[in-house]
Protein backbone atom coordinates (compact mmCIF):
# COMPACT_ATOMS: atom_id res chain seq x y z
CA UNK A 1 0.00 0.00 0.00
CA UNK A 2 2.77 2.43 0.98
CA UNK A 3 4.69 1.41 -2.13
CA UNK A 4 1.70 1.97 -4.42
CA UNK A 5 0.83 5.35 -2.90
CA UNK A 6 4.22 6.85 -2.07
CA UNK A 7 6.67 5.58 -4.69
CA UNK A 8 4.84 7.36 -7.57
CA UNK A 9 5.54 10.62 -5.68
CA UNK A 10 9.31 10.01 -5.67
CA UNK A 11 9.75 12.48 -8.57
CA UNK A 12 8.69 15.26 -6.22
CA UNK A 13 10.15 13.88 -2.99
CA UNK A 14 13.41 12.03 -3.59
CA UNK A 15 13.34 10.41 -0.14
CA UNK A 16 10.41 8.30 -1.32
CA UNK A 17 12.81 6.48 -3.67
CA UNK A 18 13.46 4.28 -0.64
CA UNK A 19 10.19 2.49 -1.36
CA UNK A 20 11.68 1.26 -4.62
CA UNK A 21 14.04 -1.04 -2.71
CA UNK A 22 12.81 -4.42 -1.53
CA UNK A 23 15.43 -4.46 1.23
CA UNK A 24 13.96 -1.29 2.74
CA UNK A 25 10.38 -2.50 2.46
CA UNK A 26 11.26 -5.94 3.85
CA UNK A 27 12.97 -4.32 6.84
CA UNK A 28 9.93 -2.11 7.31
CA UNK A 29 7.69 -5.17 7.19
CA UNK A 30 9.71 -6.94 9.89
CA UNK A 31 9.51 -4.02 12.31
CA UNK A 32 5.86 -3.29 11.54
CA UNK A 33 4.94 -6.91 12.20
CA UNK A 34 6.94 -6.85 15.44
CA UNK A 35 5.14 -3.74 16.69
CA UNK A 36 1.66 -4.98 15.74
CA UNK A 37 2.30 -8.38 17.35
CA UNK A 38 3.50 -6.86 20.62
CA UNK A 39 0.39 -4.67 20.65
CA UNK A 40 -2.05 -7.44 19.75
CA UNK A 41 -0.46 -10.30 21.70
CA UNK A 42 -1.28 -9.47 25.35
CA UNK A 43 -4.77 -8.29 24.46
CA UNK A 44 -5.49 -11.43 22.42
CA UNK A 45 -4.21 -13.70 25.19
CA UNK A 46 -6.41 -11.98 27.77
CA UNK A 47 -9.46 -12.12 25.50
CA UNK A 48 -8.96 -15.80 24.60
CA UNK A 49 -8.51 -16.74 28.26
CA UNK A 50 -11.82 -15.09 29.09
CA UNK A 51 -13.61 -16.83 26.22
CA UNK A 52 -12.02 -20.27 26.41
CA UNK A 53 -11.53 -20.61 30.18
CA UNK A 54 -10.16 -24.13 30.74
CA UNK A 55 -11.67 -25.64 27.64
CA UNK A 56 -8.45 -26.27 25.64
CA UNK A 57 -8.41 -30.09 25.19
CA UNK A 58 -5.17 -31.98 25.89
CA UNK A 59 -4.49 -35.47 24.50
CA UNK A 60 -5.19 -37.99 27.25
CA UNK A 61 -2.64 -40.43 25.79
CA UNK A 62 0.13 -37.83 25.65
CA UNK A 63 3.04 -37.30 28.05
CA UNK A 64 1.86 -36.67 31.61
CA UNK A 65 3.79 -33.40 31.74
CA UNK A 66 1.34 -31.96 29.19
CA UNK A 67 -1.61 -32.20 31.55
CA UNK A 68 -0.44 -29.04 33.33
CA UNK A 69 -1.00 -27.15 30.07
CA UNK A 70 -4.74 -27.55 30.47
CA UNK A 71 -6.33 -24.12 30.26
CA UNK A 72 -3.70 -22.49 28.06
CA UNK A 73 -5.63 -20.60 25.35
CA UNK A 74 -5.29 -21.67 21.74
CA UNK A 75 -5.96 -19.85 18.41
CA UNK A 76 -2.81 -17.76 18.92
CA UNK A 77 -2.37 -17.98 15.17
CA UNK A 78 -4.79 -15.05 15.00
CA UNK A 79 -1.98 -12.83 16.28
CA UNK A 80 0.41 -14.07 13.58
CA UNK A 81 -2.15 -13.84 10.79
CA UNK A 82 -3.31 -10.32 11.65
CA UNK A 83 0.24 -8.99 12.06
CA UNK A 84 1.56 -10.58 8.87
CA UNK A 85 -1.39 -9.55 6.71
CA UNK A 86 -1.41 -5.92 7.87
CA UNK A 87 2.37 -5.61 7.53
CA UNK A 88 2.41 -7.24 4.07
CA UNK A 89 -0.43 -5.05 2.82
CA UNK A 90 1.40 -1.95 4.05
CA UNK A 91 4.80 -2.69 2.53
CA UNK A 92 4.26 -4.96 -0.51
CA UNK A 93 3.20 -4.10 -4.04
CA UNK A 94 -0.54 -4.75 -3.98
CA UNK A 95 -0.57 -5.26 -7.75
CA UNK A 96 1.61 -8.36 -7.42
CA UNK A 97 -0.14 -11.64 -8.17
CA UNK A 98 2.34 -13.33 -5.84
CA UNK A 99 1.17 -11.18 -2.92
CA UNK A 100 -2.44 -12.04 -3.76
CA UNK A 101 -1.61 -15.76 -3.91
CA UNK A 102 0.30 -15.97 -0.65
CA UNK A 103 -2.23 -13.93 1.32
CA UNK A 104 -5.14 -15.96 -0.09
CA UNK A 105 -3.59 -19.24 1.05
CA UNK A 106 -2.56 -17.73 4.38
CA UNK A 107 -6.03 -16.41 5.17
CA UNK A 108 -8.02 -19.36 3.81
CA UNK A 109 -5.89 -22.00 5.52
CA UNK A 110 -6.02 -19.89 8.67
CA UNK A 111 -9.82 -19.90 8.46
CA UNK A 112 -9.87 -23.70 8.10
CA UNK A 113 -7.60 -24.00 11.12
CA UNK A 114 -9.75 -21.55 13.08
CA UNK A 115 -12.90 -23.59 12.45
CA UNK A 116 -11.01 -26.72 13.52
CA UNK A 117 -9.80 -25.03 16.73
CA UNK A 118 -13.25 -23.64 17.48
CA UNK A 119 -14.81 -27.10 17.18
CA UNK A 120 -12.16 -28.56 19.49
CA UNK A 121 -12.61 -25.87 22.13
CA UNK A 122 -16.39 -25.67 21.99
CA UNK A 123 -16.84 -29.46 22.11
CA UNK A 124 -13.89 -30.03 24.49
CA UNK A 125 -12.65 -32.71 22.09
CA UNK A 126 -9.28 -33.02 20.30
CA UNK A 127 -10.97 -34.42 17.18
CA UNK A 128 -12.12 -31.11 15.69
CA UNK A 129 -13.10 -30.92 12.03
CA UNK A 130 -13.34 -34.19 10.11
CA UNK A 131 -10.04 -34.92 8.40
CA UNK A 132 -11.58 -35.63 4.99
CA UNK A 133 -13.59 -32.41 5.01
CA UNK A 134 -10.52 -30.44 6.03
CA UNK A 135 -8.52 -31.93 3.15
CA UNK A 136 -11.28 -31.19 0.64
CA UNK A 137 -11.19 -27.50 1.58
CA UNK A 138 -7.39 -27.37 1.55
CA UNK A 139 -7.03 -29.10 -1.82
CA UNK A 140 -9.72 -26.94 -3.39
CA UNK A 141 -8.04 -23.69 -2.35
CA UNK A 142 -4.61 -25.05 -3.29
CA UNK A 143 -5.86 -26.05 -6.75
CA UNK A 144 -6.94 -22.48 -7.50
CA UNK A 145 -3.73 -20.91 -6.19
CA UNK A 146 -1.51 -23.46 -7.99
CA UNK A 147 -3.34 -22.74 -11.25
CA UNK A 148 -3.18 -18.98 -10.67
CA UNK A 149 0.56 -18.95 -9.98
CA UNK A 150 1.27 -21.24 -12.93
CA UNK A 151 -0.86 -19.07 -15.22
CA UNK A 152 1.09 -15.96 -14.21
CA UNK A 153 4.56 -17.51 -14.50
CA UNK A 154 6.45 -17.65 -17.78
CA UNK A 155 6.42 -21.02 -19.54
CA UNK A 156 8.18 -23.50 -19.37
CA UNK A 157 9.45 -22.34 -15.96
CA UNK A 158 5.86 -22.41 -14.69
CA UNK A 159 5.67 -26.21 -14.75
CA UNK A 160 9.34 -27.10 -14.32
CA UNK A 161 10.69 -28.86 -11.25
CA UNK A 162 14.31 -27.96 -10.50
CA UNK A 163 16.76 -29.82 -8.30
CA UNK A 164 19.18 -28.19 -5.85
CA UNK A 165 22.94 -28.70 -6.25
CA UNK A 166 22.47 -29.88 -9.88
CA UNK A 167 22.04 -26.93 -12.26
CA UNK A 168 21.25 -28.97 -15.39
CA UNK A 169 18.76 -31.41 -13.91
CA UNK A 170 15.17 -30.26 -14.41
CA UNK A 171 11.87 -31.99 -15.13
CA UNK A 172 8.94 -30.35 -16.91
CA UNK A 173 5.89 -31.83 -15.19
CA UNK A 174 3.45 -30.25 -17.64
CA UNK A 175 -0.16 -30.90 -16.66
CA UNK A 176 1.00 -32.87 -13.62
CA UNK A 177 2.51 -29.76 -12.06
CA UNK A 178 -0.73 -28.41 -10.59
CA UNK A 179 -1.58 -31.65 -8.70
CA UNK A 180 2.05 -31.71 -7.53
CA UNK A 181 1.81 -28.09 -6.33
CA UNK A 182 -1.45 -28.87 -4.53
CA UNK A 183 0.25 -31.73 -2.72
CA UNK A 184 3.16 -29.47 -1.71
CA UNK A 185 0.87 -26.77 -0.26
CA UNK A 186 -1.47 -29.13 1.58
CA UNK A 187 1.36 -31.40 2.71
CA UNK A 188 3.31 -28.44 4.07
CA UNK A 189 0.27 -27.12 5.91
CA UNK A 190 -0.37 -30.41 7.67
CA UNK A 191 3.33 -31.09 8.33
CA UNK A 192 3.69 -27.86 10.32
CA UNK A 193 0.45 -28.74 12.11
CA UNK A 194 1.89 -32.10 13.21
CA UNK A 195 5.09 -30.41 14.42
CA UNK A 196 3.22 -27.94 16.61
CA UNK A 197 3.09 -30.12 19.72
CA UNK A 198 5.52 -28.52 22.17
CA UNK A 199 6.03 -24.97 23.40
CA UNK A 200 7.97 -23.06 20.74
CA UNK A 201 8.74 -26.15 18.67
CA UNK A 202 7.08 -25.17 15.39
CA UNK A 203 7.52 -21.40 15.23
CA UNK A 204 11.34 -21.31 15.15
CA UNK A 205 11.65 -23.78 12.22
CA UNK A 206 8.94 -21.77 10.46
CA UNK A 207 11.04 -18.61 10.89
CA UNK A 208 14.15 -20.42 9.65
CA UNK A 209 12.38 -21.62 6.51
CA UNK A 210 10.90 -18.14 6.06
CA UNK A 211 14.39 -16.64 6.19
CA UNK A 212 15.60 -19.15 3.59
CA UNK A 213 12.75 -18.18 1.27
CA UNK A 214 13.25 -14.48 1.98
CA UNK A 215 16.71 -14.88 0.43
CA UNK A 216 15.48 -17.12 -2.37
CA UNK A 217 12.53 -14.92 -3.34
CA UNK A 218 14.73 -11.81 -3.40
CA UNK A 219 17.33 -13.52 -5.60
CA UNK A 220 14.85 -15.25 -7.93
CA UNK A 221 13.11 -11.92 -8.50
CA UNK A 222 16.37 -10.19 -9.45
CA UNK A 223 17.45 -11.05 -13.01
CA UNK A 224 21.18 -10.45 -12.47
CA UNK A 225 21.40 -12.38 -9.20
CA UNK A 226 19.32 -15.26 -10.58
CA UNK A 227 21.54 -15.49 -13.65
CA UNK A 228 24.74 -15.40 -11.60
CA UNK A 229 23.54 -18.12 -9.22
CA UNK A 230 21.99 -20.08 -12.09
CA UNK A 231 18.49 -20.33 -10.64
CA UNK A 232 15.17 -19.66 -12.35
CA UNK A 233 14.34 -15.98 -12.72
CA UNK A 234 10.74 -15.41 -11.61
CA UNK A 235 9.71 -11.83 -12.41
CA UNK A 236 7.98 -10.20 -9.46
CA UNK A 237 8.73 -12.95 -6.95
CA UNK A 238 10.87 -10.54 -4.95
CA UNK A 239 7.69 -9.16 -3.39
CA UNK A 240 7.42 -12.39 -1.45
CA UNK A 241 10.44 -11.25 0.58
CA UNK A 242 8.14 -8.68 2.21
CA UNK A 243 5.76 -11.44 3.29
CA UNK A 244 8.66 -13.53 4.62
CA UNK A 245 9.93 -10.54 6.59
CA UNK A 246 6.49 -10.00 8.09
CA UNK A 247 6.36 -13.68 9.05
CA UNK A 248 9.74 -13.51 10.79
CA UNK A 249 8.73 -10.40 12.75
CA UNK A 250 5.43 -11.91 13.88
CA UNK A 251 7.14 -15.22 14.63
CA UNK A 252 9.66 -13.61 16.96
CA UNK A 253 6.94 -12.00 19.03
CA UNK A 254 4.80 -15.15 19.04
CA UNK A 255 7.83 -17.04 20.40
CA UNK A 256 7.96 -14.46 23.21
CA UNK A 257 4.54 -15.64 24.35
CA UNK A 258 4.84 -19.28 23.23
CA UNK A 259 8.22 -20.11 24.81
CA UNK A 260 7.96 -22.61 27.67
CA UNK A 261 5.81 -22.30 29.69
CA UNK A 262 3.57 -21.09 26.88
CA UNK A 263 1.01 -18.39 27.54
CA UNK A 264 -0.76 -19.26 24.29
CA UNK A 265 -0.77 -21.97 21.60
CA UNK A 266 -0.93 -21.11 17.90
CA UNK A 267 -3.41 -23.93 17.30
CA UNK A 268 -4.42 -25.11 13.84
CA UNK A 269 -5.31 -21.48 13.14
CA UNK A 270 -1.62 -20.67 12.99
CA UNK A 271 0.09 -23.94 12.06
CA UNK A 272 -2.03 -24.79 9.01
CA UNK A 273 -1.82 -21.21 7.73
CA UNK A 274 1.95 -21.04 8.22
CA UNK A 275 2.54 -24.40 6.56
CA UNK A 276 0.33 -23.54 3.60
CA UNK A 277 2.19 -20.25 3.16
CA UNK A 278 5.57 -22.00 3.15
CA UNK A 279 4.33 -24.45 0.52
CA UNK A 280 3.09 -21.56 -1.61
CA UNK A 281 6.44 -19.78 -1.30
CA UNK A 282 8.18 -22.86 -2.63
CA UNK A 283 6.01 -23.25 -5.73
CA UNK A 284 6.05 -19.50 -6.47
CA UNK A 285 9.86 -19.41 -6.43
CA UNK A 286 10.23 -22.86 -8.06
CA UNK A 287 12.16 -24.25 -5.09
CA UNK A 288 9.85 -27.01 -3.97
CA UNK A 289 12.64 -29.45 -3.10
CA UNK A 290 14.44 -26.77 -1.11
CA UNK A 291 11.32 -26.62 1.08
CA UNK A 292 11.76 -30.32 1.85
CA UNK A 293 15.39 -29.64 2.85
CA UNK A 294 14.96 -26.40 4.82
CA UNK A 295 11.74 -27.75 6.33
CA UNK A 296 13.23 -31.20 6.86
CA UNK A 297 12.09 -31.20 10.48
CA UNK A 298 8.48 -31.00 9.29
CA UNK A 299 9.16 -33.90 6.90
CA UNK A 300 10.63 -36.01 9.71
CA UNK A 301 7.64 -35.31 11.96
CA UNK A 302 5.20 -36.25 9.20
CA UNK A 303 6.98 -39.47 8.25
CA UNK A 304 7.13 -40.52 11.90
CA UNK A 305 3.32 -40.42 11.97
CA UNK A 306 3.01 -42.26 8.64
CA UNK A 307 5.46 -44.96 9.73
CA UNK A 308 3.71 -45.37 13.08
CA UNK A 309 0.29 -45.78 11.47
CA UNK A 310 1.49 -48.19 8.77
CA UNK A 311 3.42 -50.31 11.26
CA UNK A 312 0.45 -50.57 13.60
CA UNK A 313 -1.92 -51.53 10.77
CA UNK A 314 0.40 -54.07 9.13
CA UNK A 315 2.48 -55.70 11.88
CA UNK A 316 0.39 -54.47 14.84
CA UNK A 317 3.41 -52.90 16.49
CA UNK A 318 4.49 -49.34 17.20
CA UNK A 319 7.89 -48.23 15.93
CA UNK A 320 7.91 -45.16 18.18
CA UNK A 321 6.73 -44.90 21.76
CA UNK A 322 4.45 -42.12 20.51
CA UNK A 323 4.05 -40.13 17.31
CA UNK A 324 4.82 -37.47 16.16
CA UNK A 325 8.46 -38.14 16.94
CA UNK A 326 8.90 -35.25 19.40
CA UNK A 327 6.62 -37.13 21.79
CA UNK A 328 8.76 -40.26 21.31
CA UNK A 329 11.77 -38.45 22.75
CA UNK A 330 9.67 -37.14 25.63
CA UNK A 331 8.67 -40.73 26.40
CA UNK A 332 12.39 -41.63 26.38
CA UNK A 333 12.91 -39.15 29.20
CA UNK A 334 14.03 -36.01 27.37
CA UNK A 335 12.64 -32.82 28.89
CA UNK A 336 10.41 -30.69 26.71
CA UNK A 337 13.09 -27.97 26.57
CA UNK A 338 15.72 -30.52 25.43
CA UNK A 339 13.52 -31.75 22.61
CA UNK A 340 12.63 -28.24 21.45
CA UNK A 341 16.16 -26.79 21.49
CA UNK A 342 17.71 -29.84 19.82
CA UNK A 343 15.05 -29.80 17.11
CA UNK A 344 15.77 -26.08 16.60
CA UNK A 345 19.43 -26.95 16.08
CA UNK A 346 18.51 -29.58 13.51
CA UNK A 347 16.27 -27.09 11.73
CA UNK A 348 19.06 -24.48 11.67
CA UNK A 349 21.49 -26.96 10.12
CA UNK A 350 18.93 -27.93 7.47
CA UNK A 351 18.31 -24.25 6.71
CA UNK A 352 22.04 -23.68 6.17
CA UNK A 353 22.22 -26.70 3.87
CA UNK A 354 19.30 -25.31 1.87
CA UNK A 355 20.97 -21.91 1.50
CA UNK A 356 24.25 -23.52 0.44
CA UNK A 357 22.44 -24.96 -2.60
CA UNK A 358 22.28 -21.44 -4.05
CA UNK A 359 26.04 -21.46 -4.57
CA UNK A 360 26.89 -25.14 -4.84
CA UNK A 361 25.63 -26.12 -8.29
Image: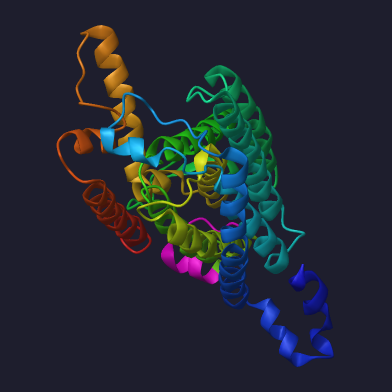
> Per the image, is 36 magenta?
no
Residue at image location 68% in from the left, 44% down from the top? 104
In the figure, 47 relative to 226: above or below? above
Tell me if I can see residue 308 in this picture.
yes
Is 85 situated left or right of 6 in this image?
left
Residue 235 found in image quarter: bottom right
Residue at image location 21% in from the left, 26% down from the top? 320
Task: Tally the numbered discs.
Answer: 0
In the figure, 114 relative to 309: above or below? below
Q: Position of residue 136 (x, y in %)?
A: 61, 22
Residue at image location 54% in from the left, 59% down from the top? 247
In the figure, 67 relative to 17: above or below? above
Q: Position of residue 125 (x, y in %)?
A: 50, 23
Tell me if I can see residue 237 in this picture.
no
Q: Position of residue 198 (x, y in %)?
A: 35, 43
Foreground: 318 or 338? 338
Q: Quadrant of the C terminus?
A: bottom left
Q: Position of residue 30 (x, y in %)?
A: 56, 69
Residue 345 found in image quarter: bottom left
Is 281 situated left or right of 154 in this image?
left
Coloring applied to the structure: rainbow
Is 293 situated left or right of 34 in this image?
left
Q: Magenta segment range? A: 224-235
Residue at image location 17% in from the left, 43% down from the top? 334
Foreground: 172 or 24? 24
Q: Quadrant of the N terminus?
A: bottom right
Amino acid sequence: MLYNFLYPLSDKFSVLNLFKYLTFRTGGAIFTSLIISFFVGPRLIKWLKEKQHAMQPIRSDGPETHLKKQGTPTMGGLMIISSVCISTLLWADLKSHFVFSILTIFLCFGMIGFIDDYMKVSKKDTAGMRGKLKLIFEFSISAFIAWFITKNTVSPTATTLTFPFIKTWTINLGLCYIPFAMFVIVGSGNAVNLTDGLDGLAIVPVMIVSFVFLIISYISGHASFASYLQISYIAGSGELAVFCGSLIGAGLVFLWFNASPAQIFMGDTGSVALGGALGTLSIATKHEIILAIAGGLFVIETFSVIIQVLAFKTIHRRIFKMAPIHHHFEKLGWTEQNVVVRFWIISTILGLIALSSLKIR
